[in-house]
Amino acid sequence: MKIAINTRFLLPTKLEGFGWFTHEVVKRIVQNNPEHEFYFFFDRKYDSKFIYGDNVTPIVINPPARHPFLYYLWFEFGVKKALRKHNIDVFLSPDGYLSLGSDVKQIPVIHDLSFVHYPEDLPFLNEKYVNHYFPKFAKKASKIITVSEYSKSDIEKSFGISEDKITVAHNGIGDFFQPILEEKKKETRSKFTNGKEYFLFVSALQPRKNVTKLFEAFDQFKKETKSDVKLLMVGEKYWWNKEIKQVFDAMTYQSEVIFTGHIQAEDLKNVYGAGLALTYVSYFEGFGIPLVEAMKCELPIISSDKTSLPEVGGEAAIYVNPFSTEDIKNGMLRIFKDQSLREELIENGKSRAQLFSWDKTAKIVWDTIVEVHEEN
């Protein structure tokens, strides 16, 4: 079988979201199936560490696809041509984008439909592109893979897709994420928060991550407790919009919020391990990988009660209404004041984390590829 894979998010210095999913899943299916041929479609110069076996042929397709007009050119001309040229049997696209003009069997991974429910959170042209094309991609697909039962139901209802066409493959978690020793916790707090305890946020800073309400809640928490607890924000300011800026600028305890930007994997593991709690109050998620990373690092979780997050967090989190500053603040107070609650959440997280494995995810993705290939 000849399988082509959209690998444009395998970026050596910025492996996030789609890129992590692609890396963890594709590495496994390539190495577990050496008898098959894989063609990786990059949109720029690639790093050789992402060529996972001798059965991989890397192909760079121009132009780099980082703008709606270029998405169209890349998928409808470059990808279509490459699929035909290499006589591909199945095309897997981990970011959900397909080539509508190709008659090759195609499988998108549609992680979530946040753009359907909150179109205002995206830049204008991106929003128009995804809301125009993703319903078409869903109908074009031979099968769809998604990362939660919530997203499966959402795709079914929003795009009118039969549930039989949609397969759930939860995101996984690697063994890299582990609890750290007390000495390393102290060292990490010294490095990032001047030795102080902190609530942790991990993700790109964008509107649907609900950082405005998090800032407001943290400000109220500080006013009530007068504690020296910090808020550590780990992630790039991708869409630091006017509203986020206004809320941040209005904070009384603005100086207690620490921004790290993107950090290396070892530091990321350590900031999970040394935190007081993960504060992940996004109002829309298809999965919520930081919840599982926190479980593996034995960090309690304060989570939004919306969309897929309760499905992922289970009993390892306390849940708050992401639209209520008061509710988020109260969640912070509970975690801050109640050590037995923190210990209970940590214990629950240890067992729950066992449910999520990239090996399981990769097997489901591979089985879906085989199923699509064998269909008439």
Image (cartoon, rainbow, N blue to C red):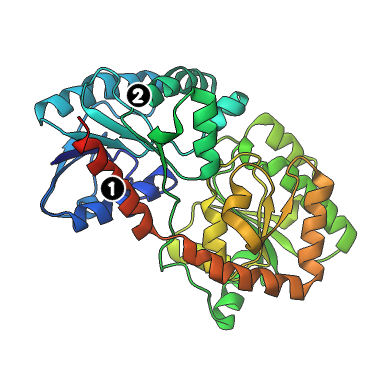
Which element type, helix, strand or loop, lies under badge 2? helix
Work out whether 266 lies above or below 170.
below
Other residues around mark 2 within 10 Å, as few (<14) / some (14–19) / many (≥20): many
Q: In the figure, 72 relative to 23: above or below?
A: above
Residue at 65% of width from left, 66% of height from top? 300
Q: Which residue is mark 1?
A: 367
Give the quarter of the image for residue 134.
Answer: top left
Residue shown at 61% from the left, 27% from the top: 117
Is 232 in front, or is 278? Answer: 278
Picture coordinates of residue 274, whole percent (x, y): 60, 71
Q: Nearer the viewer, residue 238 or 34?
A: 34
Q: Is residue 271 visible?
A: no
Vertical arrangement, residue 223 with respect to residue 175, above or below: above
The relative height of residue 269 versus residue 244 in the rendered view (above or below) is below
Residue 71 badge: 2
Mark with earlier residue (2, 1): 2
Residue at position x 45%, y 19% in the image: 129
Residue type of the residue flagged with mark 1? Asp
